[in-house]
Amino acid sequence: MHSLTEAYELLLKKIKWNTATIGVIGLGYVGLPLAMQIANNKFKVIGFEKDLNKLKAIENKVCYIQDVNAEQFLTSIHNKYFVATDDFHLLQVADIIIICVPTPTDKSGNPDLIYVLQAITAIAEHASENCLVILESTTYPGTTQEVLLPILDKANFKIGVSCFIAFSPERIDPGNPQYKTFNTPRIVGGVTQNCTELAKSFYKQVLESEVYSVSSPAVAEMEKLLENTFRNVNIALVNELTMLCHKLNINVWEVIDAAATKPYGYMAFYPGPGVGGHCIPIDPKYLVWKAKQVSIDMPLIQCADEINNRMPKYIVDRLNHYLEDGQQRIKPPHITVIGLAYKKNIDDYRESPTLSILTDINKLHYHWSVVDPNICTFSFSHQTYNTVPLTELLISSSDCVLILTNHDNIDYQMIDKHAKCIFDTRNTDYPFTNARYYRL
Ligand code: SAJ
């Protein structure tokens, strides 16, 4: 039985009575939906954000995260349940502080905890001694215990007595119409049992999903990395299989669908132009880095990364093969790329394989245009570009239409009618019959 301190009891009461003030550090694709969910459960939420563009958008009541319900966003601002600021002094009024900042990798592919360190340093400097701190950013096992805890300890926070720390991995699937913050099961792991219990009570108060506790923050940190490394490795498997199936003239999509008829022991993944986003290609690198710290090699994960990174060049090689229609080219071909976002029906192009493919196409001095109804402008190789509207003229004047992200809001019928050649890397759900059609 853990010792119930006065501070613990006070925080628990504030959670139960919805009188706790919640601070959310980082108002991106994780933090803003979480802040909305908490505010929607009648807690006062202060969002802490350094990006002035995000703060300006909130000030102008413009919701910049696609997965956030605009009405809920406006209501939480109007009812004063949600305010946003770049003044980290206000952390002093927060009873519970949740860190939702990016955890990228540096140029060498190693973890870069700069944003987490800035957040925990601000907490150590400004937060009240009686608070619950929860890290949600995906990171390597040991971060909460070995990085966050010593910083708070050094600032005289009494861990497990009046200050409580836990890790709870964010589980956001951008664009997922079914699973949102409120209904996705949660994992929480605290530094002490008090910490775990408080974090669990909080999430149970603001979410409708199950909340599962684990024995330590390290277990929670590691399970998140397992979740996403599992995806990365299995995507690499089907990417590698697609290269073999192409050589053997076997339809890899039919193979995958056939395997998916097995009701147990199998989960379908699909080949594509590569693995984008800020989770799946990045998170396994955190695992490999931590393993290296204890002299453990993880060749499977490194090999999966190499295979996934090989896909953009593989796509361009096959594109070239389809372009060689025997004609001597007077001018460079024009490629119309459908889809910049890293996966369908979202507006995020971070780490998108489309960027690598555009780099390779540039090296061949081909002309290209990018169609993506969800994205207006994008930066690429130190320049800013506009996506273009999908028009009959664009398609009919293209030497090939390269489908890299098969958003639902694309007019595939028009493409089929006017395209000379289509190379579809996503097995788009449309019966292309008119154009010369090739599939990954
Ligand atoms: N991809 C494939 N083949 C697949 C699945 C994905 O090529 O079979 C590609 C996608 O096109 C994309 C990349 O991999 O470029 C990542 O796709 P994803 O479906 O994993 O989507 P993400 O990156 O948005 O992953 C999120 C993750 N959420 C967090 O890490 C918080 C992940 O945990 C979710 O499992 C995932 O959504 C999901 O389930 O869709």
Image: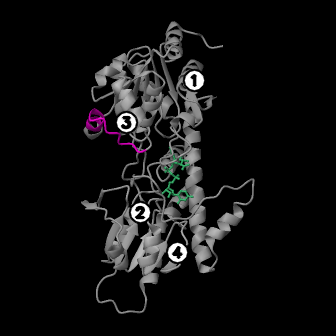
The numbered dot on residue 339 is: 2
Measured Cα–Cα span from mark 4 to mark 2 = 18 Å
Of the 4 image quadrants, the one containing the N terminus is top right
Res 196 label: 1
Q: Earlier in the sequence, mark 4 or mark 2?
A: 2
The residue stretch that appears in magenta = 55-66
Residue type pointed to by label 2: Gly
Q: How far apart are marks 1 and 4 (CA)?
A: 53 Å
Q: Tag 1: residue type?
A: Thr
Distance Cα–Cα, label 3 vs label 1: 24 Å
* Sooner in the amino-acid sequence: mark 3 or mark 4: 3
Q: Distance between the residues labelled 2 and 3?
A: 26 Å
Q: Where is residue 136 in the image (x, y as percent from the top left)?
A: 48, 34
Residue 297 visible: no
Q: Give me the residue at 39% from left, 23% from top.
A: 81
Name which residue type carries label 4: Phe
Q: Earlier in the sequence, mark 2 or mark 1?
A: 1
Q: Residue 27 carries which label?
A: 3
